[in-house]
Image (cartoon, grey):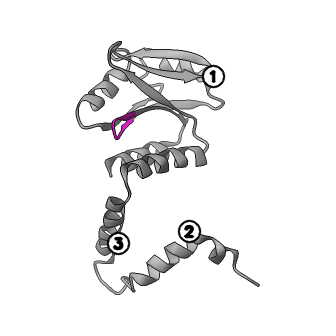
Amino acid sequence: MRNKYLEDPLISQLMEETYAMGSISEDKNSHESLNFYFEDQNKVIGSKDKMAYFEFNLNKKEILFFNLSNLKNKKTFRCIIAGYLIDFPYEWSQFKYLDKFMSSIGRGITKISPENDEDKLIEVLQPFCPYDCEIALVCYKFKTYLIFVPTGHSDIFEWIETLIEL
């Protein structure tokens, strides 16, 4: 009986790389060696690949997200949700933080939950989302996103934070 996992090229490549590294478990600093390995591999991946990886994983996790266009001349972020063209002014709600990320380091995340949703953004956008959600406004590689994070999934916020810091 053939192992279906060995037929998958990605799994095969991962196994090859793992075995090629040798046995690092004998090393008392193996976690550091592994961290260095992944940091080096991360440098090899190009910016476009990281964006594709980010978007692919959001889709894989079935997380609804939208690209926000940055309309500098109008000082707004724009997206199309369910056929509606929606503009969010830079200074409105949590979008002011997104504007700051764009004009400084090109990455960052702001979380909008019922506790800090002073402008009722969740209430306004909830009809467009098929599940109860919180909202993440993300700037990653100077590209901006509005992400509907399922309520109670702080692990997704943590995953996004970790990814955009790489």
> Can you tell which quarter of the image residue 22 is in?
bottom left
**Amino acid type of the residue tagged 2 in the rendering:** Leu
Label 1 close to label 2 by CB (< 8 Å): no
Q: Residues within 10 Å of mark 2 (few under 14, many from 20)?
A: few
Across and down, in percent, residue 23 comes to: 39, 86
Drawn side of residue 113 relative to residue 31, left or right: right
Mark 2: which secondary structure? helix
Decide which of 104, 151 is in the foreground and name it: 104
Give the vertical position of 111 relative to 83 (above or below).
below
Residue at image x 28%, y 78%?
Answer: 29
Magenta segment main secondary structure = strand
Across and down, in percent, residue 47 comes to: 37, 49
Across and down, in percent, residue 13 comes to: 51, 74
* Residue 94, visible in the rendered structure: no
Drawn side of residue 87 relative to residue 6, left or right: left
Residue beneath label 2, please?
10
Residue beneath label 3, please?
34
Across and down, in percent, residue 107 comes to: 31, 38
Residue beneath label 1, please?
82
> Can you tell which quarter of the image residue 101 is in?
top left
Q: Residues within 10 Å of mark 1 (few under 14, many from 20)?
A: few
Give the vertical position of 144 relative to 34 (above or below).
above
**Residue 140 on the magenta span:** yes
**Amino acid type of the residue tagged 1 in the rendering:** Ala
Q: CA distance from mark 3 to mark 1?
A: 43 Å
The part of the chain drawn in magenta is: 139-143
Labels 1 and 2: the sequence-earlier one: 2
Labels 3 and 1: the sequence-earlier one: 3
Give the vertical position of 150 relative to 113 (above or below).
below
